[in-house]
Amino acid sequence: MTRTRIIACSRLVAFLVLVAVTIFGIYRFASGDWTEVIAYWRDHLEVIPLLAAISVIDVILEAVSWMWVYRRFRIRAFDRGGSCAFLVGRAGLLLPAQLGRLMRPDAMVKLERASVADALKAEGVVFVLDGISVVALLAGLLVYRTYPAAAPVAAIATIGVMVFLGNTISRFLTNTRLHLPVTFWWAWPTLFIILINMGGWVAHGLALHVVVADLPGDMNLWDSLFLGPGSAVLGVATGLPGGIGVTEGILGASLRIRSVPMEHLAVAVAAFRLITFWIWIPIGWIAIAVLRRRLSAPEPFEVAALSPKGGSV
């Protein structure tokens, strides 16, 4: 069986699981005590704006780390155009196998701020540093369950090991297009970028906690901090667009294990994913429209040239 067929089969299985879980969830929601769910959300409306605020903080932290990486490649990103290019990537959340990430370097190239090679290299580094941050966070959380005081040490040690591996790999790529300066990895900005990304993943977990904190069941803060990032990473790792199906399935199964009733579970997962995932896709499309308008607008000197007698408009 070829790799392509394996990937296709895994996506089909994930889709079937999503359909089965959805049908079962609808059935349990329809046959359960839905009046209790409505009463709960009527009394907890403050959860929605708080969830939205935390989600915005999550995206802002991701944007800062993304811009900082591009800046280290001498690509201007800390401005309005860079912010627009970052949000353009949100429109690609439904593309499979992380292909949506290519929309951001493409936007920077269209803005004439970087070559294709530099933009793609910067985006690749963004992906690697983001991966290091979530692995370090999950490692720290796992150690926290047994030795709470050692959790920060475990997280920092994980970062150190991953950066060392990155530095070693970079040495093997010397004189290739993928080569990075050795000083890139062993530098304070690299650590700060990883920590900022970790802050974003913590915010993602806190967003889940805001939704499930007062639900019936045994969900606690540690569960949310671990399951929020963990389910997202496992979902994306399948190659499915946005991890759809897998992420919801992991969240739903985990909440059920923690004794959250099915009726509350379905609404909680839907609210969490709506605010932290789905709502950002139309924002990405708006960013694309803004970018296109920016690219099609004439430069100031062109407007002056078109005005009568070269005057300003």
Image (cartoon, grey):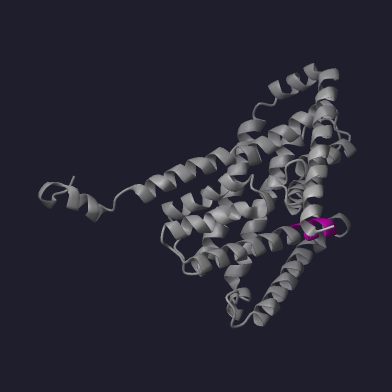
Tell which of 204 and 20 is nearer to you. 20
- Image quadrant in which you'd find residue 194: bottom right
- Residue 208 percent location from the top left of the image: 72, 41
Tell which of 10 and 201 is nearer to you. 10
Q: Is residue 89 above or below residue 159?
A: above
Q: Is residue 101 above or below residue 160?
A: above
Residue 43 seen from this side: no
Q: Which quadrant, please, contains the C terminus?
A: top left
What is the residue that sits farthest to the top in this orientation?
35
Q: Tell me what residue is drawn at x 64 percent, y 48 percent.
A: 95
Residue 148 in magenta stretch: no
Residue 70 seen from this side: yes
Question: For the magenta stretch, what is the residue range?
Answer: 137-143
- Residue 64 percent location from the top left of the image: 54, 56
- Image quadrant in which you'd find residue 282: top right
- Image quadrant in which you'd find residue 198: bottom right
Q: Tell me what residue is drawn at x 61 percent, y 62 percent.
A: 126
Q: Is residue 149 above or below residue 56?
A: below
- Residue 17 percent location from the top left of the image: 83, 38
The rendered magenta stretch, by its main secondary structure, is classed as helix
Image-based side of 227 in relation to 64, left or right:
right
What is the residue that sits farthest to the left in this orientation?
309
Q: Tell me what residue is drawn at x 84 percent, y 23 percent.
A: 27
Q: How many marks?
A: 0
Q: Which quadrant, please, contains the N terminus?
A: bottom right
Residue 138 in magenta stretch: yes
- Residue 284 percent location from the top left of the image: 53, 43
Image-based side of 154 in relation to 132, left or right:
right
